[in-house]
Amino acid sequence: MTLVRSASALGSLALVLALVVATGCGVQNGDGGSDSSSSSSSTPARTAPADGQSTPQQPTGGATQLGGISFAPIEGWNDLGANGMRKAVYQHPPVEGDAEAAEITVFYFGPDQGGTIESNIQRWIGQMQTADGGDATANAVRSKLTTGNGLDVHFVEVDGTYMKSMGGGPMTGGRKKAMPGFRMVGAIVEAPQGNVFFKLVGPSATAKAMEEGMRKMLDEATKV
C-alpha cells in the first residue's frame, strides 16, 4: 500500500512539473507572437516596464509614453487607442485608388523583451512575398537613423504581397490571406527602457502617405 501511494505522489509531481515547463516556453516578439529564440532574457515575456506602465498613459488622441519615450499621432490619423498587446493603433484613411486604410500598430513588452532587432526585422520580411509568391528578402530595404532627440531607429521597408494572419496561430496552422499591392514599413526604436516596435501595413499608396507621417512622428519622439 505504501508503494502505491508513493507512485501516485510521484506521478502527480511529474504532471505539475510538465505543466510548468509547457506554460513557460516562448518569448513575445514585436507582433505579440511567440519566438523562443529571439531573446536570451530569463524574465517572463510580459513583464511590465520599469516605470510600472504597460499601457499608454494618455487618452486616445494624445501623446503615448512607452519604454521611456513619448510620441503623438499625426493630425488626420484615426487614433484607435490600445487593444491588448497593441499599445497604440493608428489608421490612415485610404487615398484615392485604394480600398483599405493603412494601419500602424505599436508594441512594447518591457526591458529586454520582445525579441532582438534582427529577429523582428527578419520575421516582418517573412510576412511579405513578391508578386509571384516568392521570398521578399531581396525586396527589403533596411536603414538606421538617429533622430534629432538622440533615439536610434531601425527601419525595414518591403513592397509586395502581405500575408495577413487570419487567426489561429502557429500551433494550429494559422490561416493567411494574401494582400497583393501592399507595403510594410517596420520601425524599432531603441528606447531607454526597451525596444518599442512600430509596424505599418497597408495598400501601397496609402501606406506611403502614412509612412511620411510615421517618420515625422518618430523623429519628433522624445525621451521622458
Image (cartoon, helix red, strand yellow):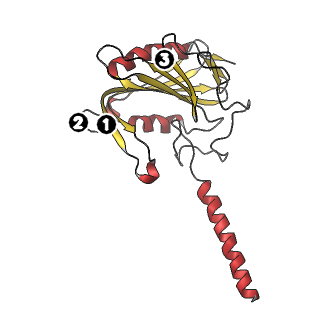
Instruction: Pick whichever of labels 2 and 1 is earlier in the sequence.
Output: 2
Residue 54 is left or right of residue 118, and the answer is right
Residue 214's disc is 3
Which quadrant holds residue 166?
A: top left
Q: Residue 15, percent across and down?
A: 64, 68
Q: What amino acid does circle 1 point to?
A: Ala
Foreground disc of the pair 2, 1: 1
Q: To which residue does mark 1 refer?
A: 178
The residue lying toward the viewer, choosing from 194 and 72, is 72
Q: Residue 156, percent across and down?
A: 43, 27
- In this rendering, is residue 167 above or below 13? above
- Residue sticking out furthest to the right: 2
Total residue callouts: 3
Q: To which residue does mark 2 refer?
A: 132
Residue shown at 56%/22% (left/top)? 152
- Residue sticking out furthest to the top: 75
Q: Could you tell me if the residues under marks 2 and 1 are in contact, i.e. CB atoms within 8 Å?
A: no
CA gap between label 2 and label 1 equals 11 Å
